[in-house]
Each structure stands twice: as C-alpha cells, then as structure tokens.
Image: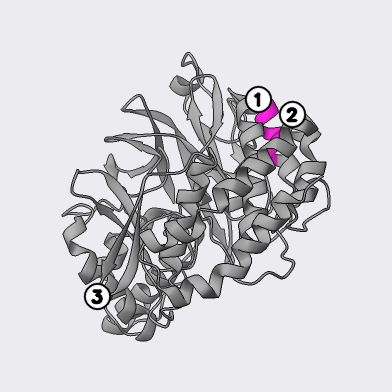
Amino acid sequence: MEYAVTIQLEGSDVPVGTLYAHVRRGVESASFRYDASYLARDGAFPIAPDMPLLDAPLHTQGEPMFRVFADCMPDRWGRSLMTRAERTRAREERRTMRTLFEHDFLAGVSDEARQGALRIWVSGEAIASVANGVPREMRIPDLLNAADRASEDLDADVSDLIAAGSSLGGARPKASIVDERGVLNVAKFPKPDESAIEDICAWEKTALDLAALAGIRVPRARLLRVTGRSVLLLERFDRQGTRRTPYLSGISAVQGSDGQRYSYLDLVAFLEEEGCEPDADIRELWKRILFSCAIGNTDDHMRNHAFLREAGGWRLSPAFDINPTPGNNQKYLRSAIDYDNDEASPQAVVDACAWFRMERAEALNEARKMASYLKKWGRLASANGISNASIEHMASSFEAGIERLSSVR
C-alpha cells in the first residue's frame, strides 16, 4: 500500500514523502522516501531521529512501522474498537475477518483527530476523514454511554466512537470532541466498572492542578460530571486553533520499543541533541520526575512523554497522563531516574540532580517548595467534587509524598 504523507507547517500542508507498507507472508514492514521538494526546503528537519534527511529509501529494521507513524496510530482502546468494527463488518458480509496490520490502524484514525502534524493521503484525499467532523461537547453523554456499551458488549455498535477516535495513548475509554469554544479536546471517560471511590478522571484533574502549582506545564483541563461520573476534558496541545504542531513521543525520541525499560537520561540526551531549549526542558523534566515520585505516578513509560516541534528544534510538551496511586507503600517508576534506579523516591531524584543541570541546593529548595504545594491536595480534590471517602482512600499516598519531599537531604 502506498500513502502520500504531508506535514503541516505554519498551517500549510507540505509534502514530506511517501510511505510504503509491505506485507509478505503475514509479516509487515514499511519503507519511506522523503520528497525531493521537502529535502530542498529551507529549514527541513527529520520527522524522527531514526529517519535522517536522505535522498534514498528508509526501511524499518525488524519493526512493522516507523515509530513516528505509530505515534499517530490508535491507542489500545482505539485498536480494540477498530478490530471489533472489522469483525462486525465481516459477519455482516459473510466473509472471514480480515487481519488488521499497522498501516490499517494508521489509515483508520480520524484525520481531524490524528495526533501531531502528519497527514496521510491516498489519491489526493486525506484518508479517514469524518463526514460530519469530530463530535461536539454536547454529545459527551451519548459518547459515554457508547463507551460503556462497547466495554460490556462485544457486539455493540462502535462506529460513533471510531469517528471520535483519538491517537493519544492508553487503554481507557476516550474520544476527541470539539468544546464550546470550538477547540479540539480529548474526553477521557471512566470505565463502566470503576467504583466511586476510584474516581480516576477527577484524581487526574487534581494531579494536573497540583503540577501547575508546582510550575510544571500542563494542558488546559476541565472536569465534567455526567450522571455523577467524572469526565476529563484535555485541550489538545498539538493544536493552535486549526493549525497542527509536529509531535514526537518519548519512545520515538529515544528510538525505543514498547515494553522495554528506559531511563530519563535517554530523554536528556535527546534534548541535548535535538532540543531548542535544552536547559529549561531538562530542568523541567527533573521537576516532573520529582512530582511523579511524590504522588506515586507510576505509569511514566516513554509514550507518556512527548515533544512538540518549534523553530530550531524540539520542546518538551505539556505533561499528561499523570495519575496518583493510593497507599503509602514504596512505589516504582516505569522509567529509571538515572541509569538503573526506578525507585519512586524524592531523595533519589535530588541525588540525581546534576544529570539534569541542577545544583543540589536548588534541587533541595525545589523539593521543599513542592512539598508546600502538595499540602493543598485535599482542598483541590474537594474543589474537583471528589467524595470524602475517595479523599480518605488517597490520603496516605499524598501525606507520604509530602513527608518524603520534606525529608530530603
């Protein structure tokens, strides 16, 4: 299969190259060639670190698809929906269900909602364009009901959810929506079996509020209550109005593979090589690690970090998918703080500060300040409508984090 690929720069779609998807004996691979006009363009940049600007075909090395295209594919939730839709079509058409390959998932993402600035075209048409566009905010109750049905009924109609699909990572139900201001958002839904005491979306909103207090850049977020359940709206940070911003996940930045373990120092190395504001971003990355350790955010794998393209290089994106976990027990990160230490310990983060361009005295001061910000957790949780029972359920985690921040030396 052959796809034309453009990248949106300053609001205009610029031809960047051609993607070729190959399937031989059930094994998928891909190749890519930059367009000559893009190579000649002033300010042209590689769309990913493992795709240098060469006037020659580039090939995946043992992977079915280039990492940067995987960044704008459906997440686990979206893949499940697309697979189920194919099963339904096959049953209705009385045929064998077709195996969906990576390029099928890439082509199946809603063009309007696709992550980043890459767009995929066939015969001059943007593929997976939705006739009626991304749904409006007023449809959130309908989409929540549809997500519930999809989670509980394997034969449920998922067409509306696919049309509102998102390529942001994760396995939780979600949909792209346009809010009342006409801005593209991701709506995160609770799972149908989520208990009231968990209230995951509301706790994610509380974590984002605390991160913002601590000086960490986060997306604009809003919490809705739909029949008593929390729905989190996150403004898409890869959009400026209708303009798209090039996006690169952490796993693409470090040229890694899903399921493998990496270090935050791999992200530091990328920022030192490719970043346009490495000093500021590396220091903020350190602060994000400290915050994750303090609240027990243990889902910090490389797809939950990202970069946006600015003039001259890549910048650390706003933080996302930050979730506290209950309990005051020792927790462990998915990404190592330095080369091998994955213990979610504020002390370990302070001890590693030199790797992140920070003096120890400054790191100690930042830990003390973060402890003072986290003391507002209960008030912010109440403001987000979290019940007293849920607050009590999470209390030991936050109080332990405050204590560990306060005791660093």
Residue 398 versus residue 9: which sits nearer the camera? 398
Could you tell me how far apart the alpha carbons at marks 1 and 2 are, in whole angstroms? Answer: 7 Å
Mark 1: give few (<14), some (14-19) or many (20+) Cα within 10 Å: some
Q: Are marks 1 and 2 in contact (CB under 8 Å)?
A: yes
- The magenta stretch spans which residues? 267-272
Identify residue type, mark 1.
Asp
Q: Residue at x 73, y 41 (%)?
A: 266
For marks 1 and 3, give the one nearer the viewer.
Answer: 3
Earlier in the chain: of badge 1 and badge 3, it is: 3
Instruction: Identify residue for label 2.
Output: 357
Q: Residue at x 80, y 49 (%)?
A: 348
Instruction: Identify residue for label 3.
Output: 227
Give the residue furthest to the top. 42
Mark 2: give few (<14), some (14-19) or many (20+) Cα within 10 Å: some
Q: Residue at x 23, y 53 (%)?
A: 134
Residue 361 located left or right of residue 397:
right
Location of residue 376 with respect to 366 vertically, above or below: below
List x then y, in percent, for residue 235.
Answer: 35, 46
List x then y, in percent, for residue 375.
Answer: 56, 54
List x then y, in percent, for residue 69.
Answer: 50, 47
Could you tell me how far apart the alpha carbons at marks 1 and 3 are, in whole angstroms? Answer: 45 Å
Identify residue type, mark 3.
Thr
Residue 408 located left or right of residue 38:
right
Residue 341 versus residue 240: which sits nearer the camera? 341
Identify residue type, mark 2.
Arg
List x then y, in percent, for residue 195.
Answer: 43, 81
Residue 26 located left or right of residue 154:
right
Question: Is the C terminus in the top left, top right, bottom left or bottom right quadrant?
Answer: top right
Instruction: Identify residue for label 1.
Output: 279
Name the image colouring: one colour
Residue 138 located left or right of residue 267:
left
